[in-house]
Amino acid sequence: MRILVALTYYRPHISGLTIYVERVARALAARGHEVQILTSQYDRALPAVEVRDKVRIRRVPVWARISKGVIMPTIGLWATRLVCWADVVWLHLPQFDAAGIALRGRLFGRPVVLTYHCDVTLPPGLLNRLANLAVHGMDHLAARMADVIVTYTEDYARHSPYLSRYLPKVRIIPPPVEIPVPRPEAVAAFRARWNLEGHVVIGMAARLAAEKGVEVLLEALPEILAVHPNARVLFAGPYRNVLGEEAYARRLAPLFARYRDHWTFVGVLEPEEMAAFFASCDVVVLPSLNATESFGLVQVEAMLCGTPVVASDLPGVRVPTRTTGMGLTVPPRDSRALARAILQVLADRPAFCRPREEVARHYNTERTAAEYEALFQALRAGRGLP
């Protein structure tokens, strides 16, 4: 089966969306399917064509940027070529170009599947408001032309202003989660590298982006430090020159300076390092603010490494802790509630721990890839929906 995958950003750009697509695309290629990615050449240093893990990547030149979006004058040409090549078209929203690609799928008789990752919530401002309107309009056009819309959880689907309009088309496929089993020697080396002995370690894994709620954790620190004066936050992920987040980073800089003895940026980590990072944490925090976060893959990665989680009580985001019992949820933007939940988990950590196998039974890449494969094959064969 020839599968065309279209999304605005792809690896090496780091986000939950790009990691999701990379994992499933790689798994589908390993199952013997031909997979091509159509995406933006958001960095001119990236090659226009590249093959990674048997997945072919076509990057289209970017002419201009609007907020976090990109304008690619030749995207239509490449979309036409690749839709003609494909047996199924798989789009990832939010994406401004999705409607045009979905239309081509309809015109050329190719099944179109959308995966909707999150609602877009851009920062205030006229330009961002116009960008929001444009992306929402194109996403709704794409939904009308799609055969199926996939999302992570029924909880998110029913609460999303976008997805709730198309529930008859919505199918739930759990997201792909994978992380190596933490090796004791790697964990010991990680703890030594970052001088973690004798410290309570609170982990956060994300981009330094406004919707991630980093300031909520910073505001919770005084209450946590009153009980655990040796507490340290380790932040894993991109934190310098994050696309579209420069002003946010400048706004938080004074708080980072204030807590410099309790806050450490460890940067982007490779998978084995991420496993060691999660296993080194006493608790991992996901204090996201809004529906731009629809699940939070990192919280399941932490659980697979034996670490409980405190997450925002948002549709979709609250599902992993409720499914596994490995943590608590708190109202978004509530730093006092976040501090109390972190302290509760730290005080009774064994009550929030579960075996890795129990978590992996709910979330794993092979399950996700198999469910997509079955969906694509059913649509291609014209048998209707599984």
Image: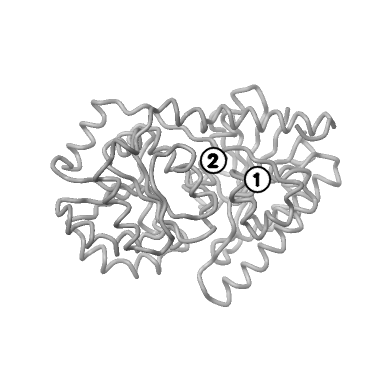
Q: Is residue 260 above or below residue 12?
A: below
Bin the neighbour count of mark 1 within 10 Å (Cα to Cα): few under 14, some 14-19, many 20 and up: many
Q: Earlier in the sequence, mark 2 or mark 1?
A: 2
Can you tell which quarter of the image residue 352 is in?
Answer: top left
Q: Residue under circle 2?
A: 20
Q: Is residue 180 above or below residue 15?
A: above
Horizontal and vertical percent for residue 216? 35, 62
Can you tell which quarter of the image residue 174 is in?
Answer: top right
200 or 214: nearer the eye?
A: 200
Q: Are marks 2 and 1 in contact (CB under 8 Å)?
A: yes
The amino acid beneath tag 2 is Tyr
The amino acid beneath tag 1 is Thr
Whole-angstrom CA distance, mark 2 to mark 1, is 10 Å
Horizontal and vertical percent for residue 246? 40, 65
User: Image point 60% across, 60% down: which residue?
Assistant: 70
Q: Is residue 58 left or right of residue 166?
A: left
Q: Which mark is residue 115?
A: 1
Bin the neighbour count of mark 2 within 10 Å (Cα to Cα): few under 14, some 14-19, many 20 and up: some
User: Image point 80% across, 51% down: which residue?
Assistant: 145
Q: Is residue 132 left or right of residue 111?
A: left
54 or 117: nearer the eye?
A: 117
User: Image point 24% across, 45% down: which residue?
Assistant: 347
User: Image point 63% across, 72% down: which residue?
Assistant: 130
Q: Is residue 86 left or right of residue 64?
A: right
Element type where label 2 sits in the image: helix
Horizontal and vertical percent for residue 231? 19, 51
Element type where label 1 sits in the image: strand
